[in-house]
Structure formats: structure tokens, C-alpha cells
Image (cartoon, coloured by chain):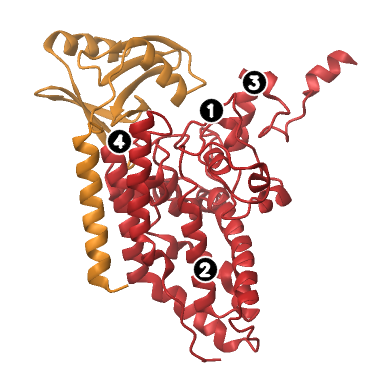
Chain colours: A orange, B red
Amino acid sequence: MPLEILLILVIGGIAGITLLLHLTGRSSQRVLTQGTARMDWRRHFPDDVVIDVTVSHDGHAALVRTETGTGLLWSLGADTVGRHLLDFDWIEHPNGFEFQFRDFSSPGVVVHLDELERRHWQHLMEPS
Amino acid sequence: MTDHVSFPDAVQWAVPFFIAAILAEFLWITIKGRGGRYETRDAVTSLIMGAGNIASGFVLGFIAYAFFMWLWQITPLNLGTSIPIIILCFVLDDLRYYWVHRFGHRIRWVWASHVNHHSSQHYNLTTALRQTWTYTFTFMMVVRAPLILLGFHPALVLFCGGLNLIYQFWIHTEAIGKMPRWFESVMNTPSHHRAHHGRNARYLDCNYAGVFIIWDKMFGTFVPEQEDDRVDYGLVHNIGTFNPLRVAFHEWVGMWRDATQPGLTLSQRLAYCFAPPGYSHDGSRDSSEQIKKKHLDRHPSDRGTPGFEQFDKNPPNTRAKRA
């Protein structure tokens, strides 16, 4: 196949499918509740025993406390990703906290929190 | 031998079909309200990975092709390009695919290339195109060497490999349940391949087939999709990014970091590169065998069921109690 035709097909195909998916509402992020966050954490870490779950007001992140430590669950498109808060940094962000992981496959996430939540999450993340 | 043989690049010619089939699947899911899920950024990442795979073929494909042409020059055999030889080459190349795919899940060096294909939590036709950019660096082209030394022309072998990939496109869908029983027993199907993409303990390291599922049945890696254990797609540790560069290279970076950490012996460093995924020198990670064992500790009733056959139905402590 001539290269220029292949390029048109590939670029046009990707652009067209992207537009179609976005315009038909496939870009919305997963919204978590206490129940779904707990279930998703168990899905990612079936060995963990969850103590409690704190979901952010926007529903896009949750702090999960387990018997072995604390973890962060967040929305990634229509799904979620979870990481134990072991090898990480968290820094203040105008909209909440930015979590940075030393993990090339999951570099970090900004969790949107209001002022009240910010203090609560900070308290929950402090080592007891 | 330098006789000129030419076959079309089947994968490139299939691109319009790929686009049309994705649109048809999306339309089907939208109208029926079942049969899979689409998410914009996930799908775009998969499509970009597919485009990158074609581009990497342009840039790096000459390495494998030069190796194959060198083998072709030293072999005294030439089986020609008759229809029976093309069919035989297709079947043998599918056996080659089975083993390369199995190595891809059991050797971390090869997994580093293949992992991106499993990195989506979705399973639709775009997932089929989420292909590696780094296959050349796995050196798995050597597994094709016996075919060429047996007298199959490199162009024919690559043509059959392209047809194999095109076949595998349509099985990446939830829109098709099960095919007729005779077809399911011989061919790789959406149902068999859904199980292969599962991160459930039951489905880890199963169904490596490309076109013919018989290889898995022959070599003991076949696990049928279970109605009571719905496939959960993705990786055991799912990645948290849609960035194609991170998708393509994350396992290579992880392997480098693991193998170069201070205080390891040489054998530990090599194990981080070539042992099955999940190896760790300090036991802090789980291999697929350990994941299955832990699952059975939580769900003992699954012992002996498909995907857990290697674990005795009656564990030693139960047998002791009975005795």
C-alpha cells in the first residue's frame, strides 16, 4: 500500500474514532462511591482487608485504609487504578494534593479536594 | 538462494477493515447496550500503539528481515510457494506463534515487550491493535529460524505471520459469545482469547494460541472461559497512564530499575530480566503460581477446577486429616 494512503488511513481513522467516542459521551471519568471504591480496591488487591474508605467529593479518588497500610484509588477513564502509599511523595496543589509515585507505569495523580477534605486526608495519611 | 519471492504486506492492507470493524463493533454495542465497553482515551492509546507498531516495523523491520535472508542464503532447502506449502507454512508459523507468545508471558525480557497488549482494562477491537513497539529487542525472531532453514521463503513466513495477526484481530471482542462447538474446539475464538486477557487468578498464563487453540490443548495451557468467573481484563497490577510512551516502555524501565538496584548477586540481576514476571529477590512480589495459590487459600472450592488443575483437589493437610 502506498505510504501516503496508509498515513491518511491511520491518522484519519484515529482522529475519526476519537471524535466519535468523545461526542457519544465515552470520555467521562468513573465516579466512585464508598461501595464501588471498596469493591475496586479488593479487585486490585484481593489479599487486603479494607478498614475504611474515604471518597473525595468529586468521586474521582478514594483513600483506602487497610490492615497493612493506606492506599490511593483513583479513576482512570472508565476504570480505576490503585497504589499502596509506600514509595511516594504528596505535595500541596491548588486543587488538592498531587501524589507522585516512583513508578514509570503510574507517575502520579492530582486529587481534587476542598479545604475540609484536604485537612481530613492529611490527618488520615499521617503515620499513627 | 536468492530467487525473488514477493507477498503483500497483509497487515497494511487490512487497515481499512480494522477501522470499519471497530466502527461496526461500536455501533453494535451502542444499539444493543451490551457486548463490551469503549472509553475514549483507552481506545486512542490502543490505536496509537497500533500505529507505532507499524512505524516500528518500518524502522526496525530490516533487522529481522536481514537475519531471515541470511538464513535463506545458507539453507539448501526450498519448498517453493505452492498452495499446500503456504497452508503448511501458516500452520507451522502458528505453532511458532504459540511458543513466542508463551515465552512472552513466562520470560520477563519478552514480557516487557508484550505487556502493553494486556495493559488495557477494556476488551474490544481497539485492544487488538494495542501492539508492541519493541518486539525486535526481544530477539524472538530466532524462533522463526527453523521455518526458514526448512525451506520456507522469508517473504512467505512473514506473509503467514501477517495473516495470523489479522485473524487475531476479530477475537478481541465481547460482542461475540461462543462460536459453534466444532469451531471452539479447533480454532482460537473470542471466548478463548477473553480468558487469555483475564487477570483473574484462574486465567493467568493460559490460551496462548494465535489461530488454532489445539496448541494449548496439546501443551496443557488451555483454560475455557467460565460462566461463573467473569473475565476481569488488564494486568495484575494495572498501569495508571494513557501515555503511549509509558505504555510502550514501562516494563523495560521497571526491569532496568530492578536489575540495577544495589546489593544484588549476578544471578538475582539475571532473574529480574529472564525469570517469569513476578520474580523478586526478597519475595516481595507474587508470581502467577503464588497468585493462584493465594486465590485457592481464599476460595478452596476452586481447587481442581479449570485453571487450577495443577493444584491437588485434596490439599496435603486435608488428606492427613482424612487418614
Left or right side of A83 for B220: right
Residue, disc 4: B39
> Residue B146, percent across and down?
63, 73
> Residue B294, percent across and down?
61, 25
Q: Chain of mark 3?
A: B
> Residue B166, percent across and down?
46, 59
Helix, strand or loop for disc 3: helix
Disc nearest the viewer among 4 and 2: 4
How far, Cα to Cα, is label 3 from label 1?
20 Å
Q: Amino acid at mark 4?
A: Glu
Residue, disc 1: B230
Which mark is first along the chain, 2 or 1? 2
Which mark is first along the chain, 2 or 3? 2
Residue, disc 2: B141
Q: Chain of mark 2?
A: B
Disc nearest the viewer among 3 and 1: 1
Residue drawn at point x = 52 percent, y = 61 percent = B164
Q: Amino acid at mark 3?
A: Asp
Residue, disc 3: B297
Q: Chain of mark 4?
A: B
How far, Cα to Cα, is label 4 from label 2?
34 Å
Q: Quadrant of the N terminus of chain B?
A: bottom right
**Extreme residue toward the left, this view:** A94
Question: Where is A6 relative to A40, above or below?
Answer: below
Which mark is first along the chain, 1 or 3? 1
Which mark is first along the chain, 4 or 3? 4
Front-lying residue, B193 or A24: A24
Which mark is first along the chain, 2 or 4? 4
Badge 4 vs badge 2, beta-carbon distance below 8 Å: no
**Extreme residue toward the bottom, this view:** B2
Left or right side of B272 for B216: right
